[in-house]
Image (cartoon, grey):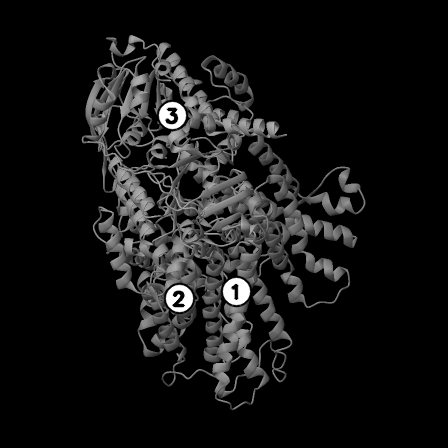
Amino acid sequence: MDWLAFLLSGTVLAATPLLIAALGELIAEKSGVLNLSVEGMMALGAAIGFIVVAESGSHWLAILAGGLASAGLAAIFAFVVLVTLGNQVATGIAVGILGVGLAGLIGKPYESMTVPPMARVPLPLLSDIPIIGPGLFNQPLLVYLAPLLAAALWWMFKHSKVGLVIRAVGESPESAHAVGYDVVGIRFLAVVTGGLFAGIAGAFISVASTTLWSDGMIAGRGWIVVALVVFAMWRVERVVIGAYLFGAATIAELLVQSAGIAAPSQLLTSIPYIATIIAIALLSMDGKRIRLNAPVSLGRVYNGAQ
Amino acid sequence: MRMPWIIDARTSNSRLVPIIAPLAAVIVTVVSGLVLMSFLGVEPGKALYQLFIAPLSTAFNVSEVLLKATPLLLIAQGLAIGFRAKIWNIGAEGQLILGAIGGSLLPIWFNDSQNVLMLPAMIVVGTCCGMAWAAIAAALRTRFNANEILVTLMLNSIALQLLYYLVAGPLRDPFGFNFPQSALFPDVAMLPTLFGGARVNAGLFVAIGLSLVAWFFVERSMVGYKLQVGGVAPHAARYAGFSEKRAVWLSLLIGGAAAGMAGVFEVAGPLGQLQRVVSPGYGFAAIIVAFLGGLNAIGILFAAFFMAVIYVGGDIAQASAGVPYAVNSVLQGILLITYIAARLFVDYRVRPRRAISTMAVS
Amino acid sequence: MKTELIGSKSGAGASCAPPLLELAGVTKSFATTVANDDISLSIAPGEIHAILGENGAGKSTLMKMIYGVLAPDSGRIRWQGEDVLMRNPAQARSLGIGMVFQHFSLFETLTVAENISLSTSQSAAKLSPRIAEIGNRFGLPVDPSAMVHSLSVGQRQRAEIIRCLLQQPKLIIMDEPTSVLPPSGIPPLFDTIRKLAEDGCAVLFISHKLEEIRALCHRATIMRAGKVVAAVDVATQTNRSLAELMIGREIPQPSRTPAKPGKRPALEIRALTHEPEDPFGTRLEGIDLVLHPGEIVGIAGVSGNGQKELAAILSGETSLSRAERDRVRINGESCGDLGPGQRRKLGLSFVPEERNGRGAVPEMTLVQNALLTAHPLGMVQKGLIARRDARAFTEHCISAMNVRCSGAAAEARSLSGGNLQKFIVGREIRLQPKILIASQPTWGVDIGAAAAIRQELIRLRDSGVAILVISDELEELFEVADRLQVLFRGRLSPSVDRADANSSLVGEYMTGGFLQQRIDSEAVAA
């Protein structure tokens, strides 16, 4: 494979889990809940996914199991935040630590094992295009599904009643309650859906892009996902763009090496983190735009039992 | 969902409940620890002993607990001041690493020094490095409005890579057979240990002393008061003219200084050199300690001690029963989650939704 | 205007039909207070029924229970003769109960049609023509595709009423609907309500304005301190008798002497134009304002016309750039770029419209709340809080303003709204300001406390302080102000002297009448 095709392929493989997890986080945040436990949810999804492949051999079962496990973790988060009215930042950190810990614990026996990678599905005709074909169109099915999922969510927030209700709950839970919506129930579903997506993303990393499990393998991707949603100003279409940009940044190491530039490997590994900081700083400068786009009630405690 | 209970905001603080919440969290954590261990094939009695009793059973183990409590206490006190102001510094781990790096520079460069000012100078340099690392987040927040949670987190990862780079190259021991670690520090660069054979050192007293300073700062000083108003009611702080930028700077610098100092205490204490691993996650555990202590300087003393017990208990369980180290994170997570959930009863009044029996559903 | 308000009254209230809604023994308590105690009332179809009571009497709580937003602790609610358990607003709506909220329950970032579609099963696109149709029928014009944040308060109210009407309710609850309208907006609203009643819809009309109730309603249930004190036929009542029922004692009237304003302005704003930081805020345009020592200037206007933004610019919570520092002057000194603390040093003090979380920190004690702005009065020594001094100051505030609380160590959240407001006003007065800005000083405050606060403002004026009162209650401004100016869409009207101020002129200004005048006079000048 040509190196350009290799880089394209690496970028979409790295971007796909970011995109899926960020879409999940977007749903939760649109409903007004800031879930900072993405790192833990992705780690748990990755561990469970890997174990399921190792034991059953089915990648799709693995993706599903990873998603469900993280949805369960997200349910714990949602309970603490929505029912016991916990601070969203502190609870997110706590559930994140729990998720990373659980992943390390159950994944321990599977460390240093490898599994067969998820099957690649070449798209007819498209995969025959030189460079772009092998780079973009000979990938696991989820790589193609992720942008379709984004398109579906874009439509949902723009045109459907469900999307309208989520936005309404995220803007003013008090008004949504007064109009007759079950704010706690809707937010619960939004957060759990976000967890499902994060778990699927984590499982994709362990069974499709790396095919091995090691403790700490998510390596801050969950936090990049959280940053990505801010970067995208809570817009689906910008989440897509951001995910592929950050996907490219996470393989910057390969990129720089292939360009023949000599640099310490630690600096190259830091590139995605540095890029995230720069992106956050540049995009946050215009506070007015953030206030205009951020869900108004994001992060605020809402008491649904009065 | 219509809950079968009603939650009202409190109109005055309850005296008793704030103590019950962390206690409840500790009990749930102990029970989950036992359940978890029995899943891993350790019978509950043995698990209870290894995790929570053994750490307190011998003088050496107690000294280990105090050794681990030192950085937790120090960092948590620094973080709590920021958390009270709702400045979320999640980057103590990175600030600790920078403190360890900064604290190591002098003893590595002047490896045969006999100067008694070595240790104080190390503490100053390390603390400043921790502050400088936190200052990046403060500058980005005040200048560009960048969210400090994300920035401090990213800085953690970058700090770790910086450490890897330095111990693999510029600060590596030239006579160390290419191991990624620095030369051993001279004696003048080491914190005095408190009693023979144990590793716990004078850093503990510094941490306890600074805890008292933190208490005084929060409860008595005008600056501490201003920070707290900013956290509880940001609009009131703005109305009163308390600068938000100053609060961000102060919170992050105090947190960074405490974490940086803790980093120096690690390299000048149990480690005695700069290594690839300078902290088993103290920076994150201290976040939990700060919350568990109710963001209160005195409460944090107890919380740091309990968290240190879990650390040592985890080590013991790992050594004797081969239990993965990740049990530690799981217990830490459970501890904070249950504490936050139990806070419901501290911050609110919960009462059952009375069934209105006279009303029939039409 | 009065004869216009008292239009045709149908006799629906007296009809013998079974009651549409009946409440018996409904009780609801919050943490420390019993908001509703053993409430009973009944409403017939087509009846316009007033719930009358002063701030804090428990009217809103009662309505929220009828609408299913809050659950009663005990008691029964009967709807068309059958007991119902009102679980949530959706159930109330399915029974045929609609509600127009005082602080609207609309979503700012959605369009009118989207907002309305949230409470029906239809899509926004399908609803638009129906919204227009209902708007025409009941005199409620509003653009379905407009974003709510771009609408005036009156337009929002219309959107909310249309939302109610689309569900063909049998009962509509309106919580203080006139409080957000300029005087000229009230008769059309009353026409709409009467049309509804003629169609057989019952209306629960919540208000504390006697004139309006006598003009519009058939019957009234009067509440005081969470209890029903009377249910009366409005036609048999006078303003005076209703007021006595509502308050239960003599209404205090502030005493005042003519103002003797000083010559040198204490506070000036010159040609100020300001873009809001808040994307949904109001742009201020060409503001000129002069305030002299010893006078009270009132800023009138329907809320949402720039009051918040103006107050924040005066207090320093919004500070201007250095280049614009001359736009705001305190005693001749330019201070546009100074923060609130520095302006306080120049002699300005400020009572903000929000008590909880801005003027006071609910979770902190009164002593700590005194420190908030009074700390420069020697309460900090070498960086440490002088707790004894702070406590003495707090106790002075409590006794001077007759604040009812359990002492200086009481948490602010344990005080009633009126008492906390008295404490804040007392604190700001004891800073011995040269200028006092009070924004909505009696919002949500009971009549006794409101009278005390107004009297205190007048007393302060007499001692030579320059006072600016921003309020959306015209009656309040007529009571305290020596001069009036009106804010409309971020522009400030010319000043009207107390003697010339009447509700028709000020009412005209409140809908922007002065803008036309200005254009005319400019044309003449040209």
Amino acid on which disc 1 is placed: Ala
| Residue B10 in view of the camera | no
Nearer mark to the viewer, of 3 and 2:
3
Instruction: Residue at the far bottom: name it.
Output: B114
- Mark 2 neighbour density, 10 Å: few (under 14) some (14–19) many (20 or more): many
Chain hosting mark 3: C
Q: CA distance from mark 1 to mark 2?
A: 15 Å
Cβ atoms under marks 1 and 3 closer than 8 Å: no
- Kindly indicate the quadrant of the structure image that contains residue C210: top left
Q: Are marks 1 and 2 in contact (CB under 8 Å)?
A: no
Can residue B101 be seen from the camera position used here?
yes
User: Callout 1: residue from which chain?
Assistant: B
Residue type of the residue flagged with mark 3: Thr
The x and y percentages for residue A7 are 73, 53
Sequence order check, earlier mark of 1 and 2: 2
Look at mark 1 in the image and give the residue it sits on: B134
Q: Which residue is mark 2?
A: B77
Left or right side of C346 for C480: left
Q: Between tags 1 and 3, which lies in front?
A: 3
Identity of the residue furthest to the right in this view: A130
Q: Label 2, secondary structure: give it.
A: helix
Pick the front one: B362 or C414: C414
What number is the disc on residue C178?
A: 3
As drawn, B140 above or below A295: below
